[in-house]
Image: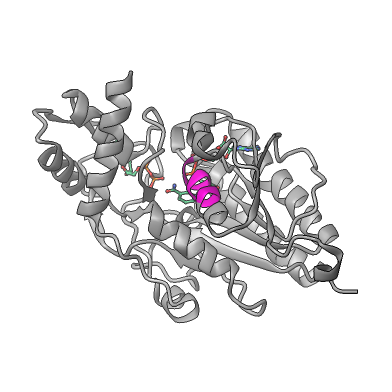
Amino acid sequence: MRKKDLHIPQHKTILVTGGAGFIGSHLCERLLKDGNEVICMDNFFTGTKENIRNFLQDPHFELIRSDIVHPVFVEVDEIYNLACPASPIHYQYNPVKTVKTNVMGSINMLGLAKRVKAKILQASTSEVYGNPNVHPQKETYWGNVNPIGIRSCYDEGKRCAETLFFDYHRQNKVRIKVVRIFNTYGPRMHPNDGRVVSNFIVQALKGIDITIYGDGSQTRSFCYVDDMVNGLISMMNTDDEFIGPVNLGNPGEFTIRELAEKVIDLTGSKSKIIYNPLPSDDPERRRPDISLAREKLGWTPGIELESGLKKTIHYFDQILREK
Ligand code: NAD
Ligand code: UDP
């Protein structure tokens, strides 16, 4: 008998861990719009109910307050594993927990995927390249990571998670997808998140000093969140043979000083730039080579930094007015 004849729903049931976070909440929203059943699992360490408020009452949306370091039993077709604090101040707050989230959390989610035969996507990071000696970064580059520094809980945690994904694939035939996300920004970043885009915009809107760490010559490539969500879903929908890892990010590269100047310009702020010490192991430059994503996913980001920043500034402006 076919599933259709049993009156079992035809649409997919999708688990998003970290679904109440910045990227996760946009992903849940998009998956709901596409007609799926979405289960969001989050421990609310950095995520908020506010992020998912618009669809909390949607009958196709379900929230589980739980931590991925504990096993969970749900019947799902796909898993997006996004649970993990992404901002340096948050992942360094409890570094041992960050490692547990990446290692034990991945084992739990991969175990679930194995049991229910779900496809599982891991939100890995450009941090697996560390302070890269190769520029721009291609997926074939193995990275330059300090294993004992203050960023290591995140960098090595994510590297070990990638290892686990590939070993579950080789050993247990789990259908995996690994994406390496480069700096992503947009509405629903937490105003006190500590990442550069949210910091600069909030500082500019409040008219307080803009804090550049180091001399601001370090570079990053910034991807708007809608582009990122498109990339994640495109990767999940590739055929089973393509498992990654694949870079997802916007190849436009900017110095942190250029970013500060752009934010000042777009907000018309009177804020002054001040220079604070550079945290240790802060990567000097970062830009994704996205030829693999272009080829395999037909994906390319469409939102330029200036237009993405305008949308993000509008969001933070509203948030700050409500306070
Ligand atoms: P975020 O901090 O806004 O979201 C992370 C979410 O995971 C939060 O809702 C948090 O409460 C939840 N979480 C954390 N630990 C958990 C645990 N143990 N159990 C259950 N839930 C937990 O960060 P984000 O920017 O939305 O990042 C999402 C994912 O993408 C992360 O895995 C991050 O490493 C990855 N990533 C993000 C970026 C970026 O620039 N935003 C870059 C590279 C990788
Ligand atoms: N940064 C900065 N001022 C801030 C926050 C961050 O100059 O208020 C710098 C930080 O040192 C890094 C870059 O901006 O060089 C990006 O930092 P973020 O924390 O956003 O992400 P990551 O370092 O993980 O790429």
Task: Identify the residue shown where x is 45% and y is 37%.
Answer: 88
Q: Is residue 256 left or right of residue 185?
A: left
- Looking at the rendered structure, the number of numbered marks drawn on it comes to 0
Q: Position of residue 103 (x, y in %)?
A: 69, 47
Residue 182 placement, left or right of 53:
left
- The secondary structure that dominates the magenta segment is helix
- Percent x, y of residue 107: 75, 51
> Can you say whether 299 is above or below 103 in the image?
below
Question: Does the magenta-highlighted stretch encompass residue 276?
Answer: no
Outermost residue, right side = 1
- Residue at 62%, 72% (x, y): give it: 243
Say which quarter of the image contains residue 269.
top left
Residue shown at 19% from the left, 31% from the top: 204
Q: Nearer the viewer, residue 207 or 155?
A: 207
Query: Is residue 132 placed above or below 23 in the rendered structure?
Result: below
| For residue 107, side relative to residue 287 (left or right) | right
Asked whether 292 or 234 is in front, the reply is 234
Query: Residue 292 appears at what percent x and percent y?
Result: 45, 77
Q: Quadrant of residue 20?
A: top right
Q: Which residues are magenta?
A: 22-29
Residue 129 in view: no
In the foreground, 270 or 9: 9
The location of residue 2, given as percent across then percent down, is 85, 73
